[in-house]
Amino acid sequence: MRDNKKHMKRAYILLVLATALTVSPLVSAEGLQPIVLSSAQLALIRANCVSIRSSLQRLHENDALARVNLGREYETISNKLMAPMNSRIALNKLDGVMAAKTTVEFDDELATFRSSYQRYEESVARTINIDCQERPVDFYQMIEYARMYRAEVRQTVMRMSELIKKYRMQIDTIHQTSDKKHAGAK
């Protein structure tokens, strides 16, 4: 229970820091804007430096495991489900053009997932290595980069999920069309 309160306090501090910025939009076409923190915000970062870095370290470790597992699942979907299904569709002389296009889109998103996750992982690792006592602004700036890259990963995961649903509907349509052809041939 006590550890839970500590984690909640750390999360609250990060939330306060994220919402208390005195700058206009952080993200522009060129990336993040320079951050200006008040002396109170700098003091808050310094006061909670060790616990924030510890929380980031745990997040980094947990995210690494999640990325490996998710990456394996996506590889399995692409290589052991979509590719063989597309081959079976072609061998049975069915119209699988749309399913094949969706597979290509999925594979492209998988490549995007890998690169986005790599940027995210590197930004978290760099953040953990910053001495937030001595360089609180740099530390906070790197947290913002990590948040931006994590949002990219999330968007990619959402697009991949939509592509999986789309592929499933296309396969269902191919199956229904095939059933109708076979029923009409009898």
Image (cartoon, rainbow, N blue to C red):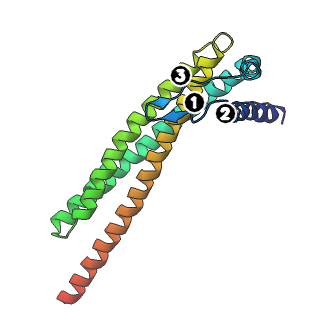
Please provide percent x and percent y for residue 186.
19, 90
Chain-order first, disc 1 or disc 3: 3
| Label 3 to label 2: alpha-carbon separation | 19 Å
Task: Report the label total.
Answer: 3
The correct choice, above or below, for 140 with respect to 157 in the image is above
Tell me where residue 8 sits by quadrant. Answer: top right
Q: Give the residue type that dot 3 points to.
A: Ala
Q: Is residue 131 left or right of residue 30?
A: right
Q: Quadrant of the N terminus?
A: top right
Task: Name, please, the residue furthest toward the right.
Answer: 2
Please provide percent x and percent y for residue 164.
39, 58
The correct choice, above or below, for 88 with respect to 17 in the image is below
**Disc 1, SS:** helix
The correct choice, above or below, for 48 with respect to 79 in the image is above
Q: Which mark is residue 173?
A: none
Q: Give the residue type that dot 2 points to.
A: Ala
Q: Is residue 126 left or right of residue 103?
A: right
The correct choice, above or below, for 126 with respect to 172 in the image is above
| Label 1 to label 3: alpha-carbon separation | 13 Å
Which residue position holds label 2?
18
Chain-order first, disc 1 or disc 2: 2
Which residue position holds label 1?
144
| Label 1 to label 2: alpha-carbon separation | 8 Å
**Disc 2, SS:** helix
Is residue 133 visible in the rendered image? The answer is yes
Please provide percent x and percent y for residue 60.
57, 29
Is residue 65 visible in the rendered image? The answer is no
Q: Give the residue type that dot 1 points to.
A: Glu
**Disc 3, SS:** helix
Which residue position holds label 3?
125
